[in-house]
Image (tube, rainbow, N blue to C red):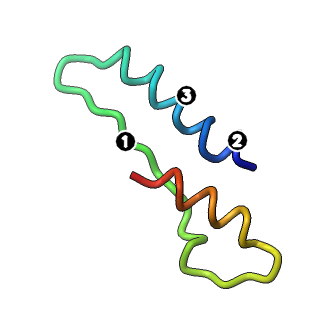
Amino acid sequence: MHRTDIRGTFLVDQQAGRRPRAGGAVISLSSSVLALALPGYSAHAATKGASRP
């Protein structure tokens, strides 16, 4: 989960940041899973929280 949710987001944003058009921006979105309290979902919620700006 860590590699996909945190490192994956970082690497995609890093590559996107190298290719901006004039006046462009990189916008990363995350799911709203942080507001939910689902059983067995804590590890995924933690990695999503770490990938938020």
Q: Residues within 10 Å of mark 1 (few under 14, many from 20)?
A: few
Q: Residues within 10 Å of mark 2 (few under 14, many from 20)?
A: few
Q: Which residue is mark 3?
A: 11
Q: Which residue is mark 2?
A: 4
Determine the CA span between mark 3 and mark 1: 13 Å
Please, which residue is most extreme toward the right here? 40
Q: Residues within 10 Å of mark 3 (few under 14, many from 20)?
A: few
Do labels 3 and 2 touch, CB within 8 Å?
Answer: no
The kind of residue on which mark 1 rests is Ile
Residue 15, horizontal then vertical, whole percent: 47, 20
- Indicate whether 49 appears above or below 39: above
Q: Which residue is mark 1?
A: 27
Residue 36, horizontal then vertical, whole percent: 62, 81
Secondary structure at badge 1 equals loop
Residue at 46% x, 31% y: name it.
Answer: 13
Secondary structure at badge 3 equals helix
In this view, the residue in front, 21 or 51, is 51
